[in-house]
Image: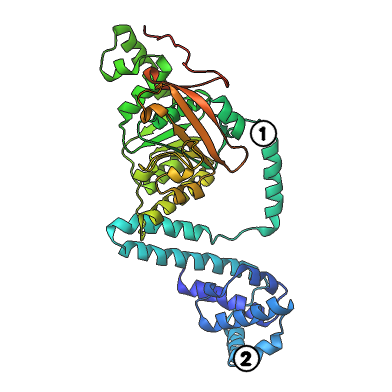
Amino acid sequence: MPCNEDTVFAEQQVTIGILTGAKEADQVFSLLTGSDFTVAAYRDIYLAASAEYAEKGQYDTGKLLDGEGVLDIFLELNQSTIMCLDIITFAKRMKVYSRERRIKGRLNQVLTADADSIFAELQAAAEEEGGKVSRDYKGMAEAQMEAVLKEIEKAPDSDRILTGYHAIDLATGGLRQGSISTWGAKPSTGKTALLLNILFHNAKAGKKTAFFSLEMSTTQLWDRILSNSCGINYGLINKKGLLEIQLRQYQNKLVELAEGGNIYLFDDVFTVEEQGSILYELKPDFAVVDYVQLVRTLQKANSRNEELANIVSRYKQFARKTNCHISLLSQFNRAGTANRQGDGPSMFNLKDSGSIEDGSDYVFLLSRPSVDDPEEPPEKTRIKLQKNKFGMVGARDLYFDGKYQRFCDVAQGEELPWPERKDVDG
């Protein structure tokens, strides 16, 4: 923190420059605000000059000096300060000093906050201060043009998350990094398995992935990933009934995937703030949260709907700042999944739906008829893309191979009963 003498001297130099009509004064008005001054008299002079400049494109120094007490201030400053021709330098110093004062003030607020609120207060202070950083508006258009040209020259899939399912990837062109999707389903439908399939598909493609589980342990997640990747019956893994050859296959694959550095699983991170810290540090290409209704925040809210809206908004912010695609798993309300058209679930069925669908760039709804009707084939699955901010919507069939916790594409027009699949493990 600069000493007060440095702060006041910088304000004196800027004020003298304004009162003498320095040619750089117009640049000072674009750099500073009244809150950057600590001396009230200097601030009043600045505000009067900047207001006239904003209205007329110029200001009258004579009119300023006619203000009450301003001439006395001018004479005093002329006697006590060393004039500097470059008042822009001092204006920039004032901006730095002002920022340091704000940060110190916010830190004092954080230190006096109760223990449960400290992290949220600190993060809010950082985000607020980040929005006050001066921008180079003149260079902004050029930078945006370069970014657009760089974007259009990229390979088609370089910054997209491909799911590995033809219909989804055709409709979306791949999920955009820097955006969020919601995947809704009833309990026991297979949404965790589906997103683990997508995560594994991207890890194999060299993408860095993260999975935040709030209801399963990392051991259970690895079991599902390895059942799929090794082709070992999940029931045998779950019951600890692997043959020696299968156990070695399981162990070797686990070591390979864990050491590959593309899959990171978490089962002990329950707040959106903690998850955000990991996302900023890890910078994955693709992340999954299972499931969003279990996530909590350190920020206070008046209702659960308001809290969930804040949580989804934070995920959107994380996605944009880390260029990660974040998939949020969501439970359905227990009221059912039929809509007025009778064609399965809709976004209305998402628990706390308004907060989730508004913040999501994509909304996928997964349904398996056997969850409600045991007479239906357990493999039969329907996935509906009901919201796509960037393109088409629609619905397609998938095949759920429960033995391997694996979803597969189904050719359109293929009739039930579903084709038989041979068990890899016999």
Reply above or below: 203 against 61.
above
Give me the disc on residue 154.
1
Give me the disc on residue 264.
none
Residue 281 in sight from this viewpoint? yes
Instruction: Give the amino acid type for the residue marked by disc 2 in the picture.
Output: Gly
Mark nearest the camera among 1 and 2 is 1
Instruction: Give the amino acid type for the residue marked by disc 1 in the picture.
Output: Lys
Picture quadrant of residue 281: top left
Residue 58 in sight from this viewpoint? no
Q: How is the image coloured?
A: rainbow
- Position in image of residue 264 (x %, y %): 40, 31
- Nearest the eye: 46 or 175: 175
Reply above or below: 55 against 110.
below
What's the CA distance linking mark 1 and mark 2? Answer: 60 Å
Which residue is under mark 2?
A: 67
At x 60%, y 80%, the residue is 47
Q: Secondary structure at mark 1?
A: loop
